[in-house]
Every structure is written in C-alpha cells, then in structure tokens.
Amino acid sequence: MEPVVQLRGAVTLLGRFPALAGIDLDVAAGEIVLLRGPNGAGKTTLLRLCAGLLPVTRGDARVLGHDLTDRRQARAVRRRVGLLGHATGLYDELTVADNVRFWGRAAGAAAEDITAALAACALDGRLAGLAVARVSTGQRRRTSLACLLARRPELWLLDEPHAGLDQEGRDLLDGLARQAVASGATVLLASHELDRAEALAHRVVTIVGGTTDPRSARVITKESLLVP
Amino acid sequence: MTTPSTSSSATRALGGLTLAGLALLLGYALVWSPPDIAQKDSVRLMYVHVPTAILAFTACAITTLASAMWLRRRSEGWWVLGGAAAEVGIVFTAICLLTGSIWGRPTWGTYWDWDPRITSTTLLFILLVGYLALRRIDNEAGDAAQRGIRGAIVGLLLLPNVMIVHYSVDWWRSLHQTATITRLDPTIEGTMLFTLMLGIAVFGLLFTWLLVHRFRVGWLEERVGATGLDQALLERRAEADVVMTAGGRA
Amino acid sequence: MFRDAGLIAGKDLRVELRSQVTTQQVAPFAILVLILFGVALDPDRGILTRASSGLFWVAVLFCSLLAIQRAFTIEAADGGRDALRLSGLDPAGIFLGKAAAIFVQLAALEVVLAVGVVVMYGTEVTGVPLLLATCLAATAGLASAGTLYGVLAAGLRVRETLLPILLLPVLAPVLIGATKGFEAALGGVAADGWPWCGLLVTFALLYTTFGTLAFGPLLEES
C-alpha cells in the first residue's frame, strides 16, 4: 500500500532560506511518527509542507497520493489533513462553539460531527459559550483540536501539541490520536516532550539542519502496544 | 575579464541614434519651429510634454502586459520587465507633469489646473508609486514563483485603472467645458507638427534605450539572487554536522 | 461558492456584532470627519450644502479604508491565513463573503453619514431613487475593490500606509461618479445622474469579477 507520506530529498524555501534542505521520509498508514530535533531544524516547516501549504522547490513529495510539487494537488491535500499548529487560527471575538462550528462547516462537517468534536474535547457546557479571548491557552488548544476533529482528517499533523495543555488535556489528546489511528488515520507529530511523545509514537525520526538524519531514526518497540 | 555591463552593440547603436535625435529635436524645438501665435514660446514645452505623456501611458501598458504574461508563464523576465517599465514610466510621468506645470504658469497663470489630463496623469503617477513601493516589499519574499503575485495583480490592473481614471476624470471635467480641453493642443501644422512627431519618435527611442538597460540590470539582479540557493543549501545542511559534532543526541 | 461566501459573511458580521468596532469606532470617526470639514470650510452654510455630495463621499472613502483594514486584521490574528487556506473554503467564496460583509458595514456607515450630512450641512434630500441606486452601486464598487486590495496589503507589515496609496487612486472614479450622481439627485437634473450610476455599476462588476478570480492566488501568498 502506498505510504501516506513519502518525501525524497524535499527542499522548501522560506524567503530565500532553505528551511528544508533535503528531507527523506516515509510514513505508512496507521503509523504515529514522532519528529524530533533542535529548534530551527525545520519540523514546523515539514508539517506545513505535508499540509500542502508550502511549495516544493526540489525533490519529490507525495502526501495521501497527491504530488505536492503540483500546486493544484497540493491544494487538494489540505482538505484531507488536519494541522494543529502553534497559531490557533481562532477568532478571538467569537465563542468557542462558534469557532468550532465555523471551521467545521467550512470543512464540510455535519452538525453531529461538530457537536461530537466539542464533546470529545470537553468543550461542551459552560466553556462553549465563552469568547476565545477569555479562555486560557490550554482551552484554546483544545478548541483548535476540536476544529481538527470535526474535519475527520486522514492525516493528523501536530506541532508541539502537548504544549500549553494540562495533564488532563494531554491525556485527552493522546487518547483522541490513538482513536483516530485505530479508525485508519495517520499521525505525524513534532514535539520536544520526548517522554510523552515517545509513549505515543511508533517511530522516531530526527530532523536537523533541514534534513532527516538517518543515523538516528528508530522504531520504538513497546510491550504496551499489545494492550489495546 | 571585461567588466560586465549592460550595453551591447545594439544599445550602443540605439543610444547613438537617440543622442543624434535629441540634438536634432533641440534644434527644431528651440530654434527652427515657430512660436505659437497665442502661446508664444511656451508652446515649445509641448515637444517634451506630449511625447512623455504618450510614453508614460505606454509604460503602463507594458507593465500590464508583462504582469499578465508573468501570471501565465511565471518566468523572471516578465517580472523584471514590469518593474523596469514602471520605473522608466514614472520618470517620464514626472517630466510630463513638470513640463505641464511650467507650461501652465505663463499660459493659465497657475502651476496647476484641473485639466482632465493633468489630473489623471497625476493619479497615474501615484498609481506607479504604489506599484513600485509594493514591488520593493515583494522582492524580499519567497521563491520566485510565489513572491510576484501581489505585484503582478497590481501591475495587471495598472492599465485598466489608468484607463478608468482617465475616462471618468475626462468626463467629469468635460462638464466644465470652457476652452479647457483644447488648451493643451494648440492648432499645429507644418514645422510644429513635424517637430512634435520628431519629439515623439526621439523620446520613444530614449524610452526604449532606458528600458533595455534597466531591464538588463534587473535581470542581472535576478541572476545573483538565484545562484544563492545551492550555497544556502550547503550552509543549511552544515548545521546538522555542527549539531552532531557538538554532542547532539544520536 | 455562495455557500462559502455566506459562511464567511456571516462570520465576519458576527465578529463585528461581538466586537462592535464599526459602531463604536468607525461611526464616530465618520461624524468626526463631517465635523472637521465643517470646521475647515467655514460653516457658512452655503459652501457645506453645495459641497455636501462630495464631502459625504470623501468621508465614506476614509471610513472604507478603516473598514477594510479591520476586515483583514481579524484574519491576521494568530494564523488565520493558514487556517483559511486549509479550511477547504473556495477562495472566490471567501472574497465574495468578505466583500459582502464590508458592503453591509459601509451601508450602515453611509446611513449614519447621510443623517449627519442632512442635519449638519442642511442638505435637502430629493431624488431618492437615484440616491439609493448610486449608493448601492458605489458601495459595491468600494467593497469589491477594497477587498481585493485589502487582501493584497494584508500580509504586509506596512499595510496601514500602503493600502491607502494603492487603493485611493483606484477609487477616484467611484468618488467622481458617486458625487456626480448625488449632485444630480440633490439639486440638479436627475437624468444627468443615471449615466454616472452606470459607470459605478460597471466598476463594481469589473472588480467583483476580477476579485473572485484573483483572490485565490493572493491568499496563497504567505
């Protein structure tokens, strides 16, 4: 089966700066892959590339069967992925529920999916009616997560997802990610919280200087995987 | 190795022709053509004013065309051409406005009149200023294919905007018709007509010469930018070695 | 496309409803502009009344700059642009939605300004059909051209200073046409005003069409 993500020597420029200077990456369906690396290595850029947001200057890049070097296909990929980034993309003036409803409907989600997403992120109840400007960072993160959930993406792209979340929020995120993978989605996440992220992931890949470092890629074998 | 320059045998020939033409034009404009009955000698400014006006509008047309072609083909040449034409165009527009204003003083008694063409030419000037300002900002951004979009859209709209503005200003001021519209065009014939035509031709040559050189300079700038990529890639990858040798976890 | 436009317009207007920026900041600014004109031009009622059409539309132009900047500031906050690109919304629909929201806000401001002009400049209101038609056509033109140039300037740090210089020369024909239309309605021959209305409609159609086509590529510019 074709890998969900397949990059060969991918180069991406931000301005004139080659944020990605040659990435080789394969992610199979149903995998959870952790991206590790120092600040400025290109992890965020890589995730955005996989979301179809950035052009590929050199090399090959295929996500979900789409060739990202073709702009039209890159745009088509966006609908099928969900990106949880540093920025929330939320409207401060609107309420939590309004935001999830807007972004959900924008992606074509049905009303039940939106309600389910709100509930799954523990955002129903009092929180739903608060303006985003008034809620905490962690709650904003969860709102973004709900927006992602509502879309039911095939590929989850998580950029430091645990940052800003409390213990409960982190457990929630991990649980949702595992559930998504169980129903056929794939997860690619970048994190500095190595303990928690490694507990979640199947495989670790290191990014340094805009390239993948083959020497340090490893598969995580966990006995816990045998326990559903 | 010879110093690289933007001239070639073609431009040298063109330049020579332009200089000769300018000399001839000066002769005709200042000496051999007669002064106008009504406007006396100040009409001689027309020999600069009218050609520069025509060429300013031509520059806009070139920019719009170049922007359209860039949007279709995304090749650097069109991007450079758009900017070059706008820069040369803005110089010609400024000369046009200046000569028009100087001409206005003895003729109308003021440096400014709400003549439709002066008004719309001034708006044209501002449109060009905005376009060039936008291009300067745009030049810092991403890869060549992406960064030109803003400039290209504004450039594409340049000629349509100029035409809409020109048309509406003309219509607007024509309602205040006195002798306004005809004031800039004294009845011309004979030597004066010839001089005017000569002026248009000579300024056309000058415009072309300037455009070619400006284009070439811009083109060289693009070349310099493009060759940086491989070097930048090497430097970027070198970060990895630094991290690894500095004891990064394997 | 229209479904997406409706979604965006609804969202923009809801944001406005919650934040009240147009009502609490731009509308007072509009009145302020009218007052400043009065102060500058000697409230000898003659000048102000005669010039009221032009002054009204200049005030609308200034307000539209604010409204357009505002419309894109709400998107600029915290990764909004990426989110829009990822959302799956049709860019043409986003354009129409944003332009529609700006249209509604400008229309509301024009009502405020109209009341202001009538009260403060002593203008008599006649020729209402022409007035309304001119208003609608001009506002549509302002909204569509404004949305196009707004998104163009939006991603830039210098947007506050660049937008006016890019947009106002483009809007000069709208100012001319709208002023002429109003003058014809308010005291001249109404028949003179309709051709200007035609110009405004053409302008609005051109920019709406062009905007729907150009918005997508412009949104991609990061």
Image (cartoon, coloured by chain):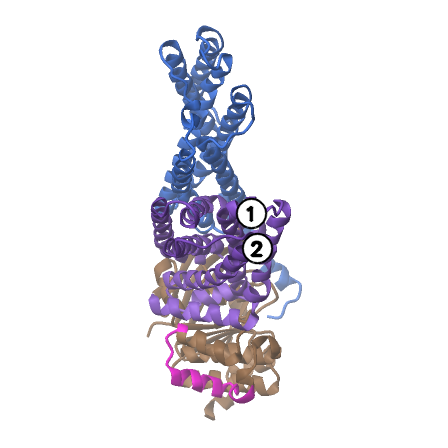
Task: Give the prevailing secondary structure in the magenta stretch.
Answer: helix
Q: Looking at the picture, which amino acid does disc 2 mark?
A: Met
Q: Which residues are magenta?
A: A106-126
Chain identity for the colour purple used in the image: C
Q: Quadrant of residue C129?
A: bottom left
* Residue B82, numbered label: none
Q: Is residue B36 above or below residue B138?
A: above
The image position of residue A216, as x and y in percent, is 54, 70
Say which element carries label 1.
helix
The image position of residue A192, as x and y in percent, is 60, 74
The image position of residue B9, as x and y in percent, is 43, 20
Q: Nearer the viewer, residue C212 or C52?
A: C52
Q: Quadrant of residue B51?
A: top left
Say which element carries label 2.
helix
Q: Same chain for the residues at labels 1 and 2, yes or no?
A: yes
Q: Looking at the picture, which amino acid does disc 1 mark?
A: Leu
Proximity of marks 1 and 2: CB atoms separated by less than 8 Å: yes
- Residue B184 visible at all: no
Question: Badge 1 is on which residue?
Answer: C48
* Residue C120, numbered label: 2
Chain B colour in the picture: blue
Name, please, the residue furthest toward the top. Answer: B32
Residue at image coords 51%, 76%: A144
Sequence-wise, the earlier of marks 1 and 2 is 1
The image position of residue B113, as x and y in percent, is 51, 30
Q: Quadrant of the C terminus of chain B?
A: bottom right
Kindly report the distance in space between the C-alpha atoms of the residues bearing marks 1 and 2: 9 Å
Chain identity for the colour brown used in the image: A
Q: Nearer the viewer, residue B204 or C106?
A: C106
Tell me the chain of label 2.
C
